[in-house]
Amino acid sequence: MSKAKTRYICQECGYSAPKWLGRCPGCGAWNSMIEEVVEATGAGGPATSRSGLFTTGDRPRPITEVEACQEERFSTGIGELDRALGGGIVPGSFILVAGDPGIGKSTLMLQMSNHIGLTGKPVLYVSGEESSRQIRLRADRLGPLSGDLFVVAETNIRVIEDHVASVSPSLVIIDSIQTAYDPELESAPGSVSQVREVAARLMRLAKVSGTPIFVVGHVTKTGVIAGPRVLEHMVDTVLYLEGERNHAFRILRAVKNRFGSTNEIGVFEMQQGGLIDVKNPSQIFLSEKPVGVSGSCVVASLEGTRPILVELQALVSSMNFGAPRRTTMGVDYNRVAIILAVLEKRVGLSLAMEDVYVNVVGGIRLDDPAVDLGIATAIASSHKGKAVDGGSIVLGEIGLSGEVRAVSRLEARLSEAAKLGFKRCIIPRRNVPQGKEMRLDMEIEGVATLREALDAAIG
């Protein structure tokens, strides 16, 4: 008589335990352990596991003897997606696209599939969450449809492999990997072992056949990709589609890319016809900037190779009860806390009994240290009730001693600001020699300390 051996695996980090635990010892997440059937075995027989790995028949050889080749990319037909991928799709690549529910992952994949199909290249779109009729209803609003876009509703990975062999597509979309399963495993679809096994089979299919494969992944309530962490290690590229559901803008961010630069972003606007490329995001983000209002400041953030001008807003108000509130949207909370401490200690602003709110307009998230000075300027502007000159931008990283440190790629940032009509830029003093060499119709003002910067920006 056979019996099933079970174990409990953390959905967040993949930690395995013989019994259920309320808190994962590996990552500390609560209620993340799920039961998984390893494999049914005979009485007294040991349980076996499948590795999902594959052999290529290659042999060890000096790297100098390996043939060098330049990977030929092909376009997705969507400029912002090409930018995030590093210039297009590399044949044989395995790409993971993740994001919150309803953010637009399936829409973006369907748009890309249709664009490539219109060029005469067959594309196979495999859905485990929608029927073929539902996909057609969603595709009708995206424009002219391609006869080379093949759709199928299937979750069995072995049947999917048969479909790939019969269609011989130039691109495969799996939406989503959490719904696909291997019938030889007894665990449920979406479990750690199923996701790991299905991903291994898809990776082998991509590398052996040279067919690029996009897989859509779910995220947990904490915003990380669901399933074992090994999924992110196996794929060549990880793309995150970010944004607020109540905002029209979506940011596609590459956090891993074996074939291009990381931290590249693509900017889209959600419209009736799907996700539309935003060619000039700076102009869009600044289109509704108020004039002559305190607490508003424009900064030039570098996202990958692209400088983007965004508006930072801050609101400082008297505390009504309890401890003062510190709320941030689009910037790191801990970074804002450090800047508030520097403003109190080095500049003398009294913020200990004030509520402080900081927001990045447009739903974009900034992690560039060059926006530090913009955050401090917006906070000081709101605190003093004095508006920053509408034709000025500020750039600089703030140190704990109150110094303003130099920023990278200043010329690209200032060129973008000049295109949008900004006439004055407050920058770190160490960047001024570089700034003077640039032939831009802008007034460059260098500052060494945060106090000097605030005097220059708001007096």
Image: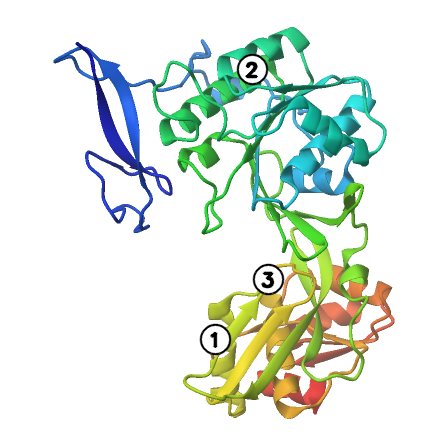
Q: Is residue 244 above or below residue 392?
A: above
Q: Which residue is the extreme one toward the top?
A: 166
Give me the C-alpha separation between circle 3 and circle 1.
16 Å
Q: Earlier in the sequence, mark 2 or mark 3?
A: 2
Measured as percent of width and height from the top left, residue 148 is found at 77, 17
Q: Is residue 127 above or below residue 224?
A: above
Secondary structure, mark 3, is loop
Secondary structure, mark 2, is helix
CB atoms at circles 2 and 3 under 8 Å apart?
no
In this view of the protein, which residue sits in the foreground, 156 or 167? 156
Give me the C-alpha separation between circle 2 and circle 3.
42 Å
Task: Indicate the amino acid at tag 1.
Answer: Ala
Measured as percent of width and height from the top left, residue 90 is found at 65, 27
Label 1 belongs to which residue?
337
Q: Which residue is the extreme one toward the left?
A: 44
Measured as percent of width and height from the top left, residue 94 is found at 56, 27
Q: How is the image coloured?
A: rainbow
**For mark 1, does the 10 Å Cα neighbourhood hold few (<14), some (14 to 19), or many (20 or more) residues?**
some
Q: Earlier in the sequence, mark 3 or mark 1?
A: 1
Task: Indicate the amino acid at tag 3.
Answer: Asp
For the C terminus, give its image quadrant.
bottom right
Mark identifier at residue 449: none
**For mark 3, does the 10 Å Cα neighbourhood hold few (<14), some (14 to 19), or many (20 or more) residues?**
some
Residue 226, image quadrant: top left
Q: Residue at x 77, y 25 (%)?
A: 116
**For mark 2, does the 10 Å Cα neighbourhood hold few (<14), some (14 to 19), or many (20 or more) residues?**
some
Label 2 belongs to which residue?
160
In this view of the protein, which residue sits in the foreground, 127 or 25? 127
Measured as percent of width and height from the top left, residue 89 is found at 68, 29
Q: Is residue 289 above or below residue 265?
A: below
Q: Is residue 271 above or below residue 63?
A: below
Label 3 belongs to which residue?
368
